[in-house]
Amino acid sequence: MAKVSSLRSYSQGAAALVTGAGSGIGRSFACELARRGSSVICVDLHADRAEQTAALVEQLGGHGIPYTCDVGDQVQFTQLAEQADSLLGRPTTLVVNNAGVGVGGRIGDISLEDWHWCLNVNLWGVIHGCHSFAPRFRDAGHGAIINTASAAGFAAAPEMTTYNVTKSAVLSLSETLSAELAGSGAHVSVLCPTIVPTNIINESRFPAERKSFAAKAMEKWAFIDSGEVARMTLDACDRNQLYVLPQWDGRLMWRFKRAAPVAYTRVLGLGYRLAAG
């Protein structure tokens, strides 16, 4: 007999773990969870950023626990997963696999070192989170995982190959996990935003000209902030919604590609050739 969750909400009063919590969307997730009365392990590669976010969580009425971890490192993440319940003082009920980095450039120009770096954080970090917590939530009959992918996971923008590949894989992983968790009382949501103001461009490995373009695009074309993205995503998770596309441009691309994938690819290629001159 399938287990049914006894929780009315995954985000209210959660015992949560958020990776990449030191800034951007991750910090906004932690702060929004604090507003909802949650305890949050604020995980980041940088200890000072994790501590800053944990302090914000405390100020907002939650309980913040800073934790330094390289999510792409199997040993480090396993240690985190083993300690999570103890740190929170109760079983973990929500995991937000949010940590991410940016890499750009054309296929063949991107170094294999950058490929490994991006895959390690963007994909393996999410795999480690799902591998560690999905079985627990399934067996317990409740709990939720939120994976931060990107509209890049389906938009396939040129010169974003490495990033696109990792986010596409996170999208596929989330869809597969959703099917595996069906009827268990546990849930997964996958977040696919377009442009959101964060630090990812500043700390990315993009070619100089692309980095400048991306920074300007983030200033001009970001129609939503990270706080709103976090709020919308947690609400969607509470509704057992798999796909979370918080912006109209992402929803437009999603529908265009699903309705006419060949036409979408042709239009994308034409636009790229025209832009390249």
Image (cartoon, grey):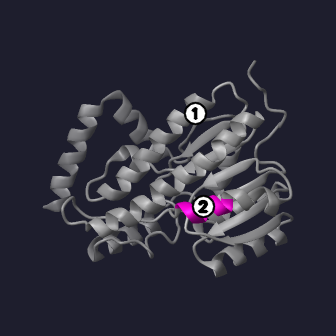
Q: Seen from this angle, which residue lies furthest top?
A: 1
Q: In the visual, does 62 lie left or right of 28? A: right
Q: Nearer the viewer, residue 92 or 243?
A: 92
Residue 89 in view, yes or no: yes
Tell me: residue 134, above or below residue 115. above
Locate residue 106: give its quadrant. bottom left
Magenta span: 74-80
Locate residue 116: give its quadrant. bottom left
Quarter of the image with the C terminus in it: bottom left
Q: Secondary structure at mark 1?
A: helix
Q: In the visual, does 89 lie left or right of 252? A: right
On the image, numbered disc 1 is attached to which residue? 178
Residue at the (74%, 61%) spot, across then down: 83
Q: Secondary structure at mark 2?
A: helix
Tell me: residue 189, above or below residue 105. above
Q: Seen from this angle, which residue lies furthest left?
A: 277
- Give the Cα distance between marks 2 and 1: 22 Å
Residue at the (47%, 42%) spot, across then down: 171
Residue 74, given in percent of the width and then of the height, sits at: 54, 60
In the image, what residue type sits under mark 1?
Ser
Earlier sequence position, callout 2 versus callout 1: 2
Numbered label tally: 2
In the image, what residue type sits under mark 2?
Phe
Residue 177, given in percent of the width and then of the height, sits at: 56, 36
Locate residue 110: give its quadrant. bottom left
Residue 257, given in percent of the width and then of the height, sits at: 35, 35
Q: Residues within 10 Å of mark 1 (few under 14, many from 20)?
A: some
Residue 99, given in percent of the width and then of the height, sits at: 55, 62
By secondary structure, the bulk of the magenta-drawn segment is best described as helix
Tell me: residue 16, above or below residue 76. above
Label of residue 77 in the image: 2
